[in-house]
Image (tube, rainbow, N blue to C red):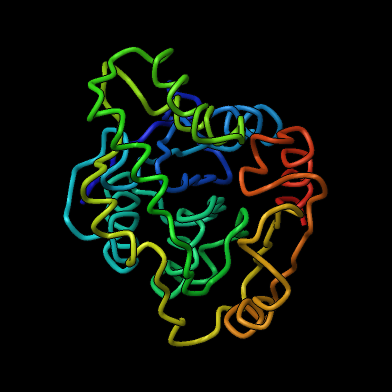
Amino acid sequence: MILSYLFIPNNNLLIKYKYTIIMLHGLFGNKKSLYLMGKFLFHSMKCKILLLDIRNHGLSPKNKKMDYISLSQDILDTLFFLNIKKNLIFIGHSMGGKIIMNLTQFIQSNSIRTIIILDIAPIKYRFNKKNIFFILEEVYKKKIFFRRDVFKLLKSFIKNKFIIGSLLKTFKNGKWEFNLPILKNEYSNILDWNPLPSTWKGTIFFLKGEKSNYINKNYYKYIFFQFPNAKIYNIPNVGHLLHMENIKLIFNLIIKLCHK
């Protein structure tokens, strides 16, 4: 499956850049979720930036499967279509990070310079997010069309302003820009994880939000078992949406890590 994509810069694509940074958003996001970060990285590193809509998100095709093998194949298909083969830097948040970790079994390690994972671990999670799906479905049940009214609804259920802001970005013309029924049906697959068939010994960094429970110390052993050269950074005073909560800090750290 060829995914919807956006390049930064979106012109002069014939210019040869040394590296391509591929950025993958998390659940309920889209390729614009990491756009500001991508723009900063382009101006600082002079790399080509590729932002993708994961299937069932944004403008990408819909499909009933959301397992990580299928999601990884989408990335491979899109990179092949765009003739992007080497000098790759991957940055992925949450679900996007799990896709990237799974991709390591399919891409030659010498093609990847660096991987940066934002607040997710290579494990099977047991979160119960029935509440969030209930809230998202309420928008349709109440036939809400305007974003300001969606904001009021979300605010009545959700206290975290960053989660509200992230969701609002994906609401347009009375619709969520993700396939809510499929994501709800496939949520167990999104939480799931099959350990890699072999360890990946390339350069990989995990950025953990201090206030987030997506990477706790009990998960470190699973990270190092599959990625023995991993380094974990604990980012102070941020939660799961660390790239939104302190974009300057995360941006500067990513720049530093990309040059290691």
Location of residue 259 with respect to 191 vertically, above or below = above
State the quadrant of the C terminus: bottom right
Residue at image point 47% right, 61% down? 100
Left or right, 84 with respect to 94, comes to: left
Left or right, 228 with respect to 189, comes to: right
Q: In this view of the protein, which residue sits in the foreground, 65 or 127? A: 127
Asked which quadrant contains residue 141, the reply is: top left
Left or right, 213 with respect to 98, comes to: right
Location of residue 260 with respect to 155 vertically, above or below = below
Provide residue 42's location: percent of width, then percent of height.
61, 31
Location of residue 21 with respect to 72 vertically, above or below = above
Provide residue 167's location: percent of width, then percent of height.
45, 32
Residue at image point 52% right, 54% down? 94
Left or right, 177 with respect to 165, comes to: left
Residue at image point 44% right, 61% down? 128
Residue at image point 40% right, 36% down? 30
Provide residue 165's location: percent of width, then percent of height.
54, 27
Provide residue 49's location: percent of width, then percent of height.
51, 37
Asked which quadrant contains residue 197, the reply is: bottom left
Q: How many marks are shown on the rendered structure?
A: 0
Q: In this view of the protein, which residue sits in the foreground, 45 or 144? A: 144
Location of residue 73 with respect to 259 vertically, above or below = below
